[in-house]
Amino acid sequence: MRTKAITLLILLLLTLSSLVKAQEPPPRPVVINVTAQTLSFGAFAHGTVGGTVSISSGGIRSSTGDIILLSLGYPYSTTLYEVIANPGTIITIMNGPNVTLPGSNGGSITLTIGASDPVSPFVTSTPPPLPTYLNVGGTISIGNTAANPPGDYSGTYDITFVQQ
């Protein structure tokens, strides 16, 4: 009789327990969507020395040398990515090499990819299909007016997303 009572008590406790999971959801491949917001440095003028124009990962534009930042209606922005992954996924960003951007009127400038926001490595916190937004900035190095005549400079760059 006592054995039956203990068995019934154990069964009762097991039926009253809450759902327990011993394993997280299976890894989901990271999906990276490039949005319409691309890395852009806006309008600026430069003199006989040159310098740099930078866009921080927070979207703040700055310059060095004799570069004058202009507000002529040309927007400046970071590149905005949408990262879709399971919450808790650790993602590291590896910037590619510097890139040479050819100009529409001759010359070329060098692009160096900058830091990201959130800072790499980061942990995703939103459940799919909601994205974690990632901003990436950069810096362009500009020579004097003879080496870099006014015009449009454009190109592409590579970054690698590593899921851990």
Image: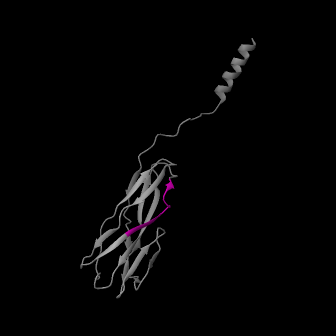
Write the residue at 42% across / 63% down: 80
Q: Is residue 9 left or right of residue 99?
A: right
Q: Nearer the viewer, residue 50 or 156?
A: 50
Residue 127: x %, y % from top left: 49, 48
Look at the picture and state if 75 lies above or below 3.
Answer: below
On whether residue 118 falls in the magenta region, the answer is yes
Say if the magenta span includes residue 11: no
Extreme residue in the bottom direction: 48
> What segment carries the magenta color?
112-123
- Quarter where residue 105 is shown: bottom left
Main SS, magenta region, reads: strand
Q: From what the image shows, is residue 80 above or below residue 104?
A: above
Q: How many marks?
A: 0
Say whether residue 3 is left or right of residue 51: right
Tell me residue 8's x, y (percent).
69, 19
Quadrant containing the N terminus is: top right
Give me the residue at 27% from left, 76% from top.
103
Residue sitting nearer the eye, 158 or 14: 158
Residue at 30% across / 71% down in the picture?
101
Toward the top, the furthest residue is 1
Percent across and percent down for residue 19 are: 60, 33
Q: Which colour scheme is used?
A: one colour
- Classify residue 156 by image quadrant: bottom left
User: In the depicted view, which residue is nearer to us: 39 or 90?
Assistant: 90
